[in-house]
Amino acid sequence: MSWRTVIISNQAKLDYKMGYMVVRGLETKRILVNEIAILLIENPMVSITGCLLEVLTEKKVKVIFCDSKRNPFAELVPHHGSHDSSLKIRTQIAWTDDVKAMIWRDIITEKIRKQSDFLKELGKDNEADLLMSYIGQVELLDATNREGHAAKVYFNALFGKEFTRSEDNSINAALNYGYSIILSAFTREISANGYLTQIGIFHSNMFNHFNLASDLMEPFRIIVDKHVLDLMPKEFGKDEKHLLWNILSEQVYIDNCNHSLDIAIKIYTKSVFDAINDNDSSRIKFYRKNEWI
C-alpha cells in the first residue's frame, strides 16, 4: 500500500527504472514507486520523463506541480480512473437534484458539527453551542446558508473578531495551502472511482475544475484548521508548507478502524458515491471527532 509523500524541492531529473523513481540531482536517489502516495514537484526546474508519468498514472500516484512560489497550481489527473468510468460518468450526470440536496445537507451538517466539536475542545462553549443550534436549521441544499453563518462565528472564535477569510495574511495562506492538499487528495479519489471532478453536488462554478472535490472535502477542512491554529505562522514559507504536508499522515477513526487521513478520504469518498447511487445518505462514513487519536 502506498503511504509516502515525496517532495522534490531542488532542481532534478525524475526517471523510472525497474520499479523505482530515480531522482537525479546533486545526488542520485531511488524511491520505490509502490510506496508513493503523493509526489509534490515543488521546483519548476524539475524535469520528469514520460515513462515515469505513465507509471505514476497507472499506480494512481497523486502528482502535484507547484509554481515558482511553491504553491500548487496543477496536478496529473488520468483520463480513465476506473474500468467503467463511462458508466460512472453517465450515472453522475443523471444524479437527481433531490438526492444531491439530501447529500449536501448531510455533508454541511457534519461540517458544522465538527466545527462545534473543535470549538468545544478549545473551551469556546458559547460559540460551540451556537453552531450546534445551527445544525437543526440546515435545510436541503442549505437554503438558509447555515454554513456561511457558522463559518463567521467559527473563524472569529479561532483567530479573533477582526479576522476574515478574504484578508491577505499568513494564516489565510496556511489555510488555503492546507485546503489545497486536502482538495488534491479528494480529486485523486474521485478520478480513481471513475467520476468527473468538474460536476459537483452543490458547487457548480464553470471555472472550477474541482467542483465535486470541493463538495466532498467540507467536513475535512477542520483538520487543516486545527493544524494552522497550532502553527499560527507569522510568515508562511517553505518550512511551514512542509509541516502541513504531514496532514495526510494523521490518524483518524473511520469505518471501525484507525486509518491515515489519506486512506480515510478514500473510504469516505467511496461511501458518498454509494450513498448517492443508493439514495441513502446513511451510507456516508464520516470520521468522528471523539475518536481522534
Image: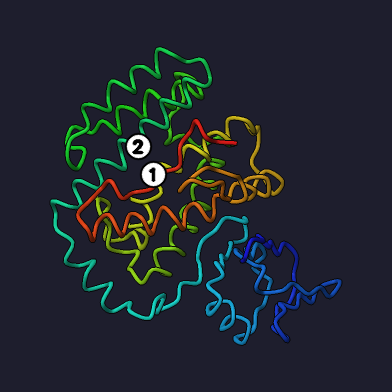
Find numbered disc 2 in the image and state the secondary structure of the residue it sits on. helix
The amino acid pointed to by label 1 is Glu
Of residues 285 and 178, the one drawn nearer to the viewer in this rendering:
285
Q: Are marks 1 and 2 in contact (CB under 8 Å)?
A: yes
- Assess disc 1: are there few (<14), some (14-19) or many (≥20) residues with their C-alpha within 10 Å of its C-alpha: some
Image spot of residue 273 (x, y percent): 31, 59
Query: Circle 2 is placed at which residue position?
Result: 110
Of residues 194 and 213, the one drawn nearer to the viewer in this rendering:
194
Whether residue 107 sits left or right of residue 21 in the image: it is left
> Which residue in the rendered view is the most extreme toward the right?
27
Image spot of residue 155 (x, y percent): 44, 27
Whether residue 23 sits left or right of residue 47 in the image: it is right
Who's the residue at 57% across and 66% down the image? 65
Query: Circle 1 is placed at which residue position?
Result: 218
Image spot of residue 152 (x, y percent): 36, 26
Find numbered disc 1 in the image and state the secondary structure of the residue it sits on. helix
Which of the 4 image quarters holds residue 11? Answer: bottom right
Colouring convention used in this rendered image of the protein: rainbow
Q: Quadrant of the C terminus?
A: top right
Of residues 104 and 147, the one drawn nearer to the viewer in this rendering:
104
- Assess disc 2: are there few (<14), some (14-19) or many (≥20) residues with their C-alpha within 10 Å of its C-alpha: some
